[in-house]
Structure formats: structure tokens, C-alpha cells
Image (spheres, rainbow, N blue to C red):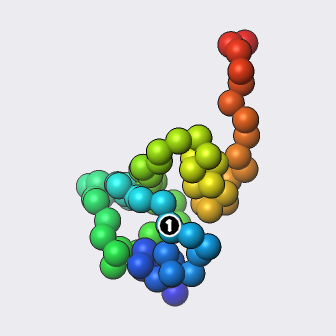
Amino acid sequence: MFNTLREANASIDGDLPLIVGVKRSGEKSVVPDGDFVLMPNDTIAVATNGLASFNRILNIFGHEATDFPISRK
């Protein structure tokens, strides 16, 4: 069983990033509340206030944070 966003927030170190939108295949986009349950393959939009929090968000959702290039290629 999957947790609500409220339950997920209680189970991680620090706060869950602010998820401002969710899109599921074949459905309209929604703005989730604390009772919303994320499902596999959901596409999410997350609010961040800087690079440090962006990297933390990537890690929370199972992605590896990589450094942005300093100069153009």
C-alpha cells in the first residue's frame, strides 16, 4: 500500500518537498493535498528555492544529484 503525502512527510528526515502538481497518464493534472497518494509513473512538479534543495529533492525521489557545468560545452 502507498502512503499519503502527509504520511510520507512524517517518515522522511526533514520536510517533503512541496509538490505543486501531479500528472497521470490519461488524466488531467491535479494540485495534490496531504491526502493525495503518489503512484508509480506519476509525473510531478516540485517547488524549490535553490540548488542545495534541488539536489536534496533529487535524492528523496531516488535520483542522483549531479553538478551543473560551470561553463558551456
Seen as rendered, the residue at the extreme bottom is: 1
From the viewer's perspective, tell me whether residue 67 is left or right of residue 12: right
Q: Is residue 53 visible?
A: yes
Q: Residue visible at 34% across and 75% down? A: 34
From the viewer's perspective, tell me whether residue 35 is left or right of residue 39: left
Disc 1 is placed on an element classified as loop
- Near-viewer residue (54 or 1): 54
The kind of residue on which mark 1 rests is Leu
Q: Residue visible at 44% across and 51% down? A: 46
Figure check: 40 above or below 7: above
Please state the horizontal and vertical placement of residue 25, each as a whole percent of the image. 39, 56
Residue 11 placement: quadrant:
bottom right
Please state the horizontal and vertical placement of residue 53, each as a whole percent of the image. 57, 50
Q: Residue visible at 70% across and 15% down? A: 71
From the viewer's perspective, tell me whether residue 42 is left or right of residue 71: left
Residue 68 placement: quadrant:
top right
Residue carrying label 1: 16
Screen quadrant of the C terminus: top right
Please state the horizontal and vertical placement of residue 51, each as a whole percent of the image. 59, 41
Figure check: 65 above or below 69: below
Q: Residue visible at 71% across and 24% down? A: 69
Please state the horizontal and vertical placement of residue 63, each as a whole percent of the image. 68, 53
- Near-viewer residue (47 or 36): 47
Q: Is residue 39 visible?
A: no
